[in-house]
Image (cartoon, grey):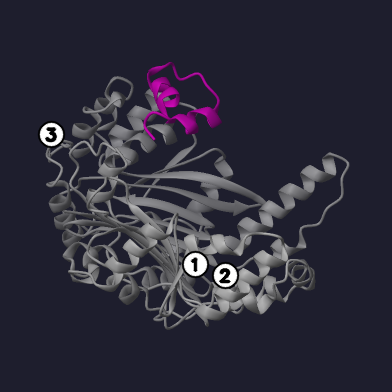
Amino acid sequence: MINDDHALTSEIALPAKRSKGKVIGIVVAAVAVVIAGAGLSFALLSGGGAQPEDILPKDTVALAKIDLNPKIGQRINLVRFLAKFPKTFRNFDQEDPVGSLINQTDASSELQWSAIKPWIGTRYAVAVIESSGAMNPILVVSVKDEAEVKYYLAKNYPELNYEIISGFLVVAEKKSTLNLITSAPSHLSDNEVYKSDMHALGGDQIAVVWADLKPIAQFAQNYINDFLYQQGLSADLNTTKNSNGRVVIGMHFTSDTFVTDILTRGIGSENQTQLDTSDSLKILGDLPASTLGAVNIEGIGASLTDGLLSNSAINDALNLIGLKAKDISELLQGPIAVIALDDGKTNDPLIFLRLTPKNPSQTIETIRMVLRRNGLDAGQLDSLVIEDGQYLYLGSDSASIRKAILQTKNPASRLGDSGLFKKTLTKSGNFSAYVDLGSFLPKLSVDTKGAPLGGLGISIGADLGSPGTSRTSIVLSLK
């Protein structure tokens, strides 16, 4: 991110004669550099105090914020997490966390941190406010010295539109946007929907993204329709008028994990196909401890039955090759897993696909029939697919498939008994994935530069504790 902003941040030391829009872009870029670096560390001062949502209007459309001054528990976890990277965060200054990190990057020669340091605080946000049919981006930065920030802006950006509200510097392209903020009778922190979403997200988050999709979709519809009209075309994207719901993202640390939670709330909840009884933690946990990585997917058969396979055109196409919709549905009815095992003898992972069809034997015969009907050699199927109990295993050759079956059926130890697995994949979901980064990446000749990487876990599914909510959990764990 720092490299991407190089051109913008390099302009911060130039004379102040530039357009207001460009000035805002430069300030945003400068703060983005701070956020990019500081988002991995910092802020050992006391938590509490005002947040950006305490000054933003109640009907704010979107907010992305980072809090480098979180509550005590989150700060302790943050410090413990960073302590595992002594080579990366060398010469770290706890009294000046942002500056000490910038001094270790290429940004140190481009960003005048010494000029910003006297006034900039530890909470930053970018928000979007809607007015007169337009989406207006604003920048919100906490300040620790109001006199210093006023002097800095008067000296470097005399034409900048800004206000200082309750300890926050608020920057906007239009003065009218600032007037909207200062005149707001209530704030986003008073918004019951926003509060409900934050409650569903839970925990002490060091960074949060929240967006109300309905006004964004409406704006996108109007923008696209206007563009098409100007091109002499006619279109009406009425479907976007019914786009409701919100997206909520939170990021936080434990002492040895970095967790990102992504929630969708009220988005097509009535039509979503979700498995309330997903058991991916047990399915993946029963794999051998030699598993380098695995993905488990549930609910594909039900989704196809409810969706694509109910389409008459698709059914006609399947009939041409001798298949029926129910054949596909039954093949994909159970969990589907893609698994990579440590071969133990070679450096190449043993990768295979494991299906759990309704009737494995019948599925094999159906596939053979389809191959013969279409003039193909059904005998080749035996070298690519092997039936074993309730499963169908697919791989590159029969020898590797049988080796995989032997490992999965008689493991010396199971993945679920591993402490790394337990702290990396913490929830079951319709889609669950686990990768042992410390073991898998070296086999792919990826240089981790000594980082103590442990595992990566991803889980996507319904949030049973909050109806109408889907939750994605991404966990990066350390050894």
The residue range painted magenta reads 1-26
Q: Is residue 22 magenta?
A: yes
Question: Looking at the image, which residue is at 16% across and 53% down?
Answer: 479
Whether label 2 touches label 1, CB < 8 Å:
yes
Q: Quadrant of residue 412?
A: bottom left
Question: Looking at the image, which residue is at 55% across and 41% down?
Answer: 175
Q: Quadrant of residue 242?
A: bottom right
Name the residue beneath numbered marker 3. 90
Name the residue beneath numbered marker 2. 267
The residue closer to the viewer here, 477 or 446, is: 446
- Separation (CA) of disc 3 from disc 1: 39 Å
Above or below 440: residue 109: above
Give amino acid for label 3.
Answer: Arg
The residue closer to the viewer here, 384 or 330, is: 384
Q: Residues within 10 Å of mark 3 (few under 14, many from 20)?
A: few
Left or right: where does residue 183 sit relative to residue 259? right
